[in-house]
Amino acid sequence: MKGTLSENTVRYCVFIIFLYVFHTECYNNLVSSYFLQESEPQLSQAEKQKQSIQEVRRSLPIFPYREDLLAAIREHQILVIEGETGSGKTTQIPQYLLEDGYTEGGMKIGCTQPRRVAAMSVAARVAQEMSVKLGNEVGYSIRFEDCTSERTILKYMTDGMLLREFLTEPDLASYSVIIIDEAHERTLHTDILFGLIKDIARFRPDLKVLVASATLDTERFSCFFDDAPVFRIPGRRFPVDIYYTKAPEADYLEACVVSVLQIHVTQPAGDVLVFLTGQEEIEACCELLQERCRRLGSKISELLVLPIYANLPSDMQAKIFNPTPPGARKVVVATNIAETSLTIDGIIYVIDPGFCKQKSYNARTGMESLIVTPCSRASANQRAGRAGRVAAGKCFRLYTAWAFKHEMEETTVPEIQRTNLGNVVLLLKSLGINDLIHFDFMDPPPHETLVLALEQLYALGALNHLGELTKAVTAGYFYNTARLSKGGYKTVKHQQTVYVHPNSSLFEEQPRWMIYHELVFTTKEFMRQVWSRPSLCSSFYGWLLEVAPHYYKNKELEDSSSKKMPRKQGKAREELG
Ligand SMILES: Nc1ncnc2c1ncn2[C@@H]1O[C@H](COP(=O)(O)OP(=O)(O)O)[C@@H](O)[C@H]1O
Ligand SMILES: [Mg+2]
């Protein structure tokens, strides 16, 4: 009995102790969770993103050099900055300058980009990093789209837009800093900016000029800007193994598709970047890839196929920056925009067919064309470099090692040396620069092209005999006229066969004659921006003789105008209304 009692007592005590412990435990749990909440409040999604953005900013190769860079900028008026793609030049330097007070007193920092997509995408990223709405403090300006406001102090823009600003503000007085970014691209507009900015820097000692470039030939920039110092940002670059094909590829598009799938099936994790030359090719490649992935179904892991080119809507463009989900692989099919302008993190494999689209100009025929040509060795090396930014990578060149050595140029010829200079001459003349032969070009355009441009503008009446600008530009598109004859349109003076672009509103109209803004060769020799004035139709030749008697001979016009029109072609004045 005694024993039973004591047993019960013990059971009771154990129960009481259990209850006590249980409660205390619960209480402690409660308390600790309460304090945990107090001391470590849950971060909202936005705050987490902000924190990670700041971490990315601090992890960029440029970050440790922030102070040195700012000191160098304080000390020198013109500074050349060289750094590996992705080191943070475009997104970070304007922010550092802002933090260092360069926008005080309402001054702006301007940063030029040769490509529209880059200007938009980089501005969006910087606005995000600064937690401001795009278009407010950070904005961009590209042709036909101005996403800036009175509050804008960091302005990204295409190089062409900054050139236009010279017309309204020839000393760029509202800017404290101008960054000419992607200087190595040597676009036509960038090259002209070099000359103009070098000039205004002389009488605006307060203006800071930064010339930023990928790791290419920066000595030339330094030399042009009176031996400006070069600030080098040491990059992080992992080794990249380069593979060539044994024989030339007959169809590089197909070769790209096969290579992507081979990488996807045989290689360890890592995203793929493919370089193609334009929208059409990129879309075709993406479609082929998607179709073959569909056919393979669950036999392969997920492959995300993402295109990137200038005309792609911006929400689609932004997709290339999204992190790849675990287990999947991303393949970005890009134009050479991804060579240095945009940095896509996570790329381990690069596929390079070795081509790009390039403008070329034939001064004799007056024809500008955009043709697919082999890219330069410097370009090919930039492309390969994209594979080694986050880890050791591989670059698959779809051409032979021999072709690399013998068929590719060392560097790309600057655009100014292979383009029609008409617009450039007009722009410079309207800025009051009359002596174009002695303009400070980094690489002067061919003498013949410059003279031809001057000659054309003189013939148009846009320049007088002293080479000064008249305001008669509108009087003269007589140079760019074409008439309908057997088999289509021919230019009036040189009898060259040209075509109306199918996108044109006049494509089906087929008036007897047309005026065009420019001749561009893509798949055919197309006239761009065409129009026809019905009221002048009947007296077209009379009009030509009136506005350009010095250019067209009566006989030359009559001869061909008396020829019979092809049947059912060529609408007369009445029909056009
Ligand atoms: N649109 C973007 N989305 C996400 N990250 C970006 C974007 N643009 C840039 N970044 C990040 O900023 C880094 C630096 O880019 P950037 O300043 O353009 O370098 P650089 O101009 O030196 O080539 C990139 O490596 C990437 O991590
Ligand atoms: Mg950049």
Image: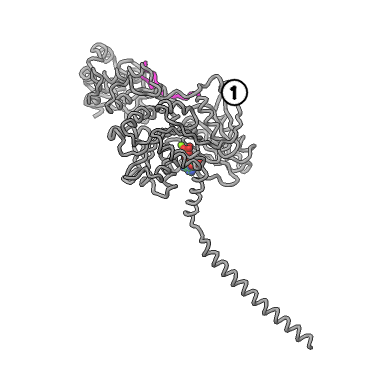
Q: Please give left or right for residue 343 compared with residue 5 in the image.
A: left
**Residue marked by disc 1:** 401
**Residue 39, image x and y in percent?**
52, 63
Image point (31%, 31%), residue name: 203
Q: Can residue 511 be seen in this view?
A: no
Q: Say which of 422 and 90 sits in front.
A: 90
x and y percent of residue 524 in the render? 41, 23
Q: Which colouring convention does the figure follow?
A: one colour
In the rendered image, the vertical position of residue 53 relative to residue 175, given as above or below = below
- For this orientation, the residue located farthest to the front is 75
Magenta span includes 373: yes
**Who's the residue at 62% across and 74% down the image?**
24
Name the amino acid, label 1: Ala
- From the image, which quarter does the C terminus lie in? top left
Is most of the magenta stretch helix, strand or loop?
strand
Q: Name which quarter of the figure residue 437 lies in.
A: top left
Query: Is residue 306 in the magenta section?
Result: no
Furthest toward the bottom, the residue is 1
Residue segment shown in magenta = 361-374
Question: Looking at the rendering, which quadrant does residue 361 occupy?
Answer: top left
Q: In this view, does 39 lie above or below 502?
A: below
Query: x, y (%) of residue 52?
Result: 51, 50
Q: Is residue 207 left or right of residue 229?
A: left
Q: Tell me which corner region of the image, top left, top right, bottom left or bottom right, holds residue 560.
A: top left
Q: How crowded is mark 1: few (under 14 residues within 10 Å), some or many (20 or more)?
A: some
Q: Return the residue nearer the eye: 258 or 237.
A: 237
Percent x, y of residue 461: 24, 21
The one of 180 and 393 positioned closer to us in this rendering: 180
